[in-house]
Each structure stands twice: as C-alpha cells, then as structure tokens.
Image (cartoon, rainbow, N blue to C red):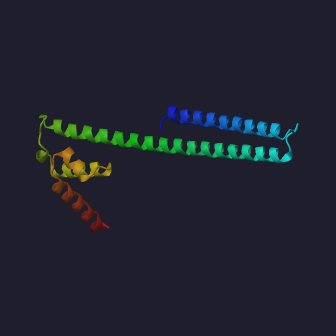
Amino acid sequence: MDVKTILIFQLIADILLCMAFLFLLLRIGRNIKRHAAAVADDRYLAEFKKLLQDSQNDAARFFLKVDESIEKFNELALSLERKEESLKRLVQDVHGQGDAGGTMGRAVSEISSEKRHDQIMKLLETGLTPEQIAGCTGLTIGEVMLIVDLEKKIQTADF
C-alpha cells in the first residue's frame, strides 16, 4: 500500500465515523421527540457517551493498525531495495566476467570453477532458487545443486 491508499482509507474511515455520529444524533433526537421530554434523560446521555467512547476507541485502534502497517511496509520496501541492489551488483559481476576475456558471449564453462562456485553461492545468498540460478548461469539444475551440496558439506566439515 502506498501513502495515497492509506490516506484514502483514513478519509473513508473518518467519513463513516461522521455518518455514524450523525445517525446516532438523529436517533437520539427522534427518541427525545417521541418521549416529549425537553431534555434527554441520563439513560440516553450515558448510552450516547458509551457509543461515542466506543467509536473513539475503534478509531484509535484503526490508526494504530495503520501506523503498524506503514512501518511494516517501510521495512519491506527497504528489504526489497537491498535485495535489488544486491541483484544489480551480481548482474554487473556476471556481465563483467563475461566481458573480461574480451568476448561478449563467453560460455559459463570457460569461467574458472572457483568463480562459478562463488557466483552460485552469491546468487543463492540473495534468495534465488537453484532453478533460477541455473537460468542465470546457464548451468543445469543438477550442477547447481551439486555445487550447493558440496558447499554445505565443506561448511559442516570445517566446524
């Protein structure tokens, strides 16, 4: 949700609260006329105060939830921006490796196995699946899974 959407929701909530308030005022006015009393008795005033307090509490809870949603949205946006920057760097690294030998279409098999391994692990750390990594690097899913499994075994053996 962007700020405009949140503001629209807030405006709609304010309008609904105003309409509910006016509705309650009309109902109380009708009840007063119906009973031919010049002044509303304590029972109606107490009911009105309770309804007014309930609506204020509901509005406060609504705004608290909106504030929480905004915070979560901002955290998510920041996380996405970080991942986007990381992916951009990885893509630049991949393109840079492809251009290092002077040929644009250098095959992945020509890249040293150490660089290929590092590239796969970086892509895995960014949250890509082995299928996505295979698509990015031109390797098969089996090769990617093999490298990932080997890395896990190396890490567990090092303690």
User: Percent x, y for residue 152?
Assistant: 27, 62
Residue 60 in the figure: left or right of residue 1: right
Residue at the image position 27 percent from the left and 52 percent from the top: 129
Q: How many marks?
A: 0
Q: Nearer the viewer, residue 51 or 145?
A: 51
User: Percent x, y for residue 102?
Assistant: 13, 34
Residue at the image position 17 percent from the left and 38 percent from the top: 98
Residue 130 in the figure: left or right of residue 86: left
Q: Nearer the viewer, residue 148 or 128?
A: 128
Q: Nearer the viewer, residue 119 or 28?
A: 28
User: Percent x, y for residue 111?
Assistant: 14, 46
Residue at the image position 26 percent from the left and 39 percent from the top: 91
Residue 92 in the figure: left or right of residue 50: left
Which quarter of the picture shows residue 59?
top right
Which quadrant: the C terminus? Answer: bottom left
User: Percent x, y for residue 9?
Assistant: 55, 36
Q: Against 61, is 157 above or below?
A: below
Residue 87 in the figure: left or right of residue 47: left
Q: Against 152, is 92 above or below?
A: above
Q: Nearer the viewer, residue 92 or 16?
A: 16
Which residue is outermost to the right? 38
Which quarter of the picture shows residue 53?
top right
Residue at the image position 69 percent from the left and 37 percent from the top: 23
Which quarter of the picture shows residue 67?
top right
